[in-house]
Image: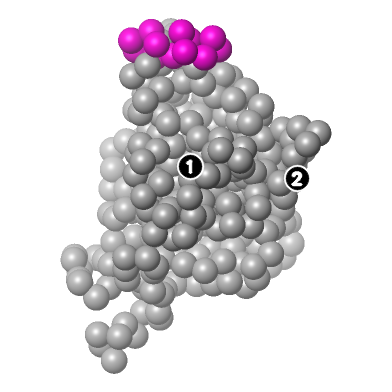
């Protein structure tokens, strides 16, 4: 997936909130794209990884030509490994190792206050005097996990609001967030978050599984929604729909019904 296809330009935009939404399929390939894209562009990245381990993301990134280990060592990537942090927190190891409160401290508290997580993001992305990175980027995979860990929808939306004010407006950076959704789901809390984020996003990339089921040549469709209406103009949102096939090191996009197998 090229930045050209999404932005019509390889230039890193500033102050944008991008929502990655998946329904009946796995949209994590978009997370890997944005992670490698921003690291290649020289941006400072804070990656709140709640779904997979560091080694998983690093293996995929290496296929895309990026080393997360090297990015961490040079201070370009700040990686929060949610799975490990949760275990360390439950067994009391987190504060022993770092001497600081865990960013996921809310798990062991009676209130679902995500202030510690926000402080982690703000500290990670606030530039130091010697920093030469371009724009700061917050990447979250995936936001729905916070609900599973006990955070309330209000706490999650407050966290995103404060991150947006800090990263997008004050630091002129970007935020990319993945959420899972199912329009037929009875999970009202998750759908509340998804609908709210859709309303406030500058760009929505919505990947969906095929209604007809599995196909080896077409893995799903992606709906690209550019929120022109968010800019308080008279323009309507621009919507483009493509189908895609995920390959080992890249993703092929094509108009609906025009896959190589059909042609």
Identify which residue is drawn at 61% across, 49% down.
17
Q: Please identify the quarter of the rendering in which residue 44 is found.
A: top right
Is residue 190 visible in the rendered structure shown here?
no
Query: Going by the image, does 238 lie left or right of 213?
Result: right
242 is higher (above) or lower (below) than 70 = below
Query: Going by the image, does 84 lie left or right of 186?
Result: right
Identify which residue is drawn at 51% across, 21% down.
103
121 is higher (above) or lower (below) than 5 = above
Q: Nearer the viewer, residue 186 or 190?
A: 190
Q: Please identify the quarter of the rendering in which residue 259 is found.
A: bottom left
The magenta-colored residue range is: 89-101
The label shown at residue 132 is 2
Tell me where residue 45 appears, x and y as whole percent. 59, 43
Query: Going by the image, does 49 lie left or right of 43?
Result: left
Q: Which residue is mark 1?
A: 69
Tell me where residue 125 appears, x and y as whole percent. 66, 35
Give the distance between the C-alpha atoms of the residues marked 1 and 2, in whole angstroms. 19 Å
Q: Nearer the viewer, residue 233 or 140?
A: 140
Identify which residue is drawn at 62% across, 72% down.
8
Tell me where residue 237 appears, x and y as whole percent. 60, 65
Tell me where residue 47 appears, x and y as whole percent. 52, 39
């Amino acid at each position: 997936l090229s930045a050209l296809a999404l932005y019509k330009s390889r230039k890193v935009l500033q102050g944008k909130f991008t929502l990655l939404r998946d329904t009946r399929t796995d949209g994590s390939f978009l997370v890997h794209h944005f992670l490698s894209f921003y690291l290649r562009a020289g941006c400072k990245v804070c990656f709140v990884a709640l779904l997979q381990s560091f080694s998983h993301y690093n293996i995929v990134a290496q296929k895309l030509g990026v080393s997360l280990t090297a990015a961490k060592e040079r201070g370009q990537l700040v990686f929060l490994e949610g799975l490990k942090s949760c275990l360390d927190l439950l067994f009391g190891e987190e504060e022993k190792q770092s001497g600081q409160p865990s960013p996921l401290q809310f798990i062991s508290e009676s209130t679902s206050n995500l202030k510690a997580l926000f402080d982690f993001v703000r500290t990670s992305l606030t530039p130091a005097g010697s920093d030469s990175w371009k724009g700061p980027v917050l990447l979250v995979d995936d936001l729905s996990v916070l609900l599973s860990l006990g955070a309330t929808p209000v706490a999650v939306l407050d966290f995103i609001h404060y991150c947006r004010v800090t990263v997008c407006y004050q630091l002129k950076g970007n935020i990319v967030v993945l959420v899972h959704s199912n329009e037929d789901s009875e999970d009202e809390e998750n759908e509340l978050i998804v609908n709210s984020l859709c309303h406030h996003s500058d760009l929505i990339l919505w990947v969906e599984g095929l209604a007809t089921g599995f196909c080896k040549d077409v893995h799903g469709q992606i709906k690209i929604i550019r929120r022109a209406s968010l800019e308080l103009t008279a323009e309507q949102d621009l919507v483009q729909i493509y189908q895609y096939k995920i390959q080992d090191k890249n993703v092929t996009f094509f108009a609906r019904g025009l896959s190589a197998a059909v042609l």
